[in-house]
Image: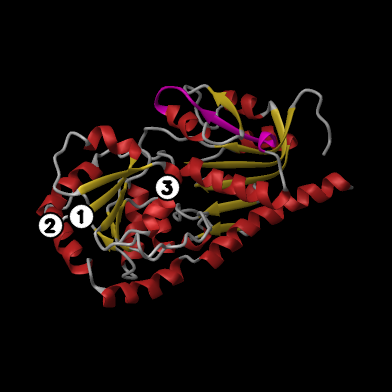
């Protein structure tokens, strides 16, 4: 790669955030981490050569909380800087790399792309809605589908980037009473808390698995159920060992589909609602609108209906395999690795 005396050089640069803010949560950062670890392993990269540019103050402190568990290089971006602004251009322009990955909802500007082109050999953008995303070497829209389609732009659920490591289900730990509840890194509408209250009406003593970040909010409730809190690294195994997943419509929905769970989907945001409605038409999931007047009745009825329904479980698993599979996820990760591989070949010339 050409040496830039005035730039800090990395193999890969990620620009993404995690925050206690609607529409951001932690999904974008976790998806970028999946890509980072995949490329690190495949190309034997060093952790220090992978850079995460993230906002880390105030509502964005979650970015640092997540990344400090990993060994990648972190550079903080001022939390007041607007996405795709001239100030952000200057920050990204301080670095150069074989690959730049931008993962966030938004509308990228042509001027922004032009200003950073010289610093990065290849560029990937994920879930952007701008027509200018066609200027990237790879554009993935696994969640945002209401966009114009261009040659080379991948749009659809089958282009999900998920944790593709198959978690072995310990039959001793699997229990029909295990219920997985997850509404992202930031449950802005406190849906998990309400669900837990409603599950008191179930004539069962359940084992409720919740992310540790919900503990302060949930601990004030008295429950007949057993509450287990898990750290992020335990997310895959807690999901795999669950019977029913009650989740929002972000990446966790597709994690649950990939792992063939019985799903009750309660979207938090508009784009999640759109995706949940589309998938519910296939009968792969049970969709409920949080604002539905009959929300309580519907939730309890669906829960009781699917709880030990093996016929239903067998039926949905066939449908879910058509939406997303380990084979499809591997294909998507290979799209990214093939792009990175091209930058290495250029370095050798």
Identify the residue at horizontal 61%, vertical 42% (top origin). 101
* Disc nearer the start of the sequence (3/1): 1
Give neighbour class at mark 2: few <14, some 14-19, many 20+ (Cα, 10 Å): few
Does 348 sit above or below residue 65? below
51 part of magenta stretch: yes
Q: Nearer the viewer, residue 335 or 306?
A: 306
Kindly give the residue lying farthest to the right in the view shown: 349
Q: Residue at x 25, y 39 (%)?
A: 189
Q: Which residue is mark 3?
A: 234
Image quadrant in which you'd find residue 99: top right
Specify which label sits upstream in the sequence, 3 or 2: 2
Q: Which residues are magenta?
A: 47-59
Cα distance in 3D space between marks 3 and 2: 26 Å
Q: Which mark is residue 202?
A: 2
Secondary element under disc 2, as helix, strand or loop, is loop
Eye-nearest disc, 2 or 1: 1
Can residue 30 be seen? yes
Residue that extends furthest to the front in the rendered view of this protein: 172
State yes or no: discs 2 and 1 in contact (Cβ < 8 Å).
yes
Q: Is residue 25 above or below residue 206?
A: above
Tag 3's secondary structure? helix
Q: Is residue 19 left or right of residue 205?
A: right
Disc 2 to disc 1, how far (Cα)? 9 Å
- Residue receiving disc 1: 206
Measured as percent of width and height from the top left, residue 120 is found at 72, 39
Question: Disc 1 on helix, strand or loop?
Answer: loop
Find out whether residue 262 is within the magenta segment: no
């Amino acid at each position: 790669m050409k040496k830039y005396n005035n730039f800090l050089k990395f193999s890969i640069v990620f620009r993404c955030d995690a925050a206690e803010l609607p529409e951001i949560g932690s999904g974008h950062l976790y998806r970028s981490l999946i890509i980072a670890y995949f490329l690190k392993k495949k190309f034997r990269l060093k952790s220090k050569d992978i850079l995460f540019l993230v906002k880390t103050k105030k509502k964005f402190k979650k970015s640092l909380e997540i990344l400090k568990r990993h060994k990648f290089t972190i550079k903080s971006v001022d939390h007041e800087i607007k996405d795709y602004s001239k100030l952000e251009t200057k920050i990204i322009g301080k670095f150069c790399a074989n690959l730049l990955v931008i993962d966030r909802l938004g509308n990228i500007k042509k001027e922004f792309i032009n200003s950073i082109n010289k610093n990065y050999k290849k560029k990937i953008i994920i879930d952007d809605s701008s027509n200018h995303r066609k200027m990237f070497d790879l554009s993935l829209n696994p969640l945002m589908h209401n966009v114009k389609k261009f040659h080379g732009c991948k749009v659809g659920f089958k282009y999900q980037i998920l944790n593709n490591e198959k978690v072995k289900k310990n039959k001793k730990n699997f229990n029909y009473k295990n219920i997985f509840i997850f509404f992202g890194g930031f449950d802005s509408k406190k849906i998990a808390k309400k669900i837990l209250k409603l599950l008191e009406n179930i004539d069962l003593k359940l084992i409720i698995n919740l992310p540790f970040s919900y503990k302060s909010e949930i601990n004030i409730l008295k429950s007949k159920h057993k509450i287990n809190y898990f750290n992020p690294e335990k997310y895959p195994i807690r999901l795999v060992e669950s019977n029913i997943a009650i989740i929002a419509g972000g990446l966790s929905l597709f994690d649950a589909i990939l792992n063939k769970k019985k799903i009750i989907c309660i979207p938090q945001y508009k784009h999640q609602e759109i995706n949940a409605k589309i998938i519910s038409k296939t009968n792969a999931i049970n969709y409920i609108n949080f604002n539905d007047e009959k929300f309580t009745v519907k939730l309890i009825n669906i829960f009781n209906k699917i709880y030990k329904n093996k016929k239903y479980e067998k039926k949905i698993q066939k449908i879910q395999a058509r939406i997303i599979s380990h084979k499809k996820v591997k294909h998507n990760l290979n799209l990214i690795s093939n792009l990175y591989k091209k930058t290495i070949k250029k370095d050798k010339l």
